[in-house]
Image (cartoon, helix red, strand yellow):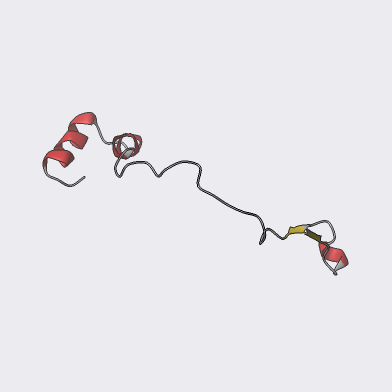
Amino acid sequence: MVHQPASAALSRFRVLDLTRTQSCLRVKAPPRGQDTDDVLGEAGYSADEIADLRRRDVV
């Protein structure tokens, strides 16, 4: 269902009513920590620094 706004100033916008639309999860969440090495690497940590963090149970 599409609702048209009453205001002329908002007439270029459409508001969609999705309350009757079914939703579902198509994939499971990734395992905890799956992307940790990639994220830390992108943040500037070296592989040795990441390994040290793992040894110290920081991540």
As drawn, the residue found furthest toward the right would be: 8
Look at 22% across and 30% down and name the residue there: 47
Instruction: Tell me where residue 12 sits by quadrant.
Output: bottom right
Given residues 21 and 4, the one toward you in this image is 21
Instruction: Tell me where residue 18 sits by quadrant.
Output: bottom right
Given residues 13 and 44, the one toward you in this image is 13
Quarter that holds the C terminus: top left
Look at 35% across and 35% down and name the residue there: 42
Q: In this view, does 27 lie above or below 19?
A: above
Look at 30% across and 39% down and name the residue there: 40
Given residues 18 and 14, the one toward you in this image is 18
List x then y, in percent, for residue 3: 80, 62
List x then y, in percent, for residue 32: 30, 45
List x then y, in percent, for residue 48: 18, 31
Quarter that holds the N terminus: bottom right
Give the total number of marks visible in the rendering: 0
- 25 left or right of 17? left
List x then y, in percent, for residue 35: 34, 38
- 24 left or right of 13? left
- 51 left or right of 27? left
Look at 58% across and 52% down and name the residue there: 23
Q: Is residue 58 above or below residue 38?
A: below
Q: Is residue 52 above or below residue 16?
A: above
Instruction: Tell me where residue 31 sits by quadrant.
Output: top left
As drawn, the residue found furthest toward the bottom would be: 6
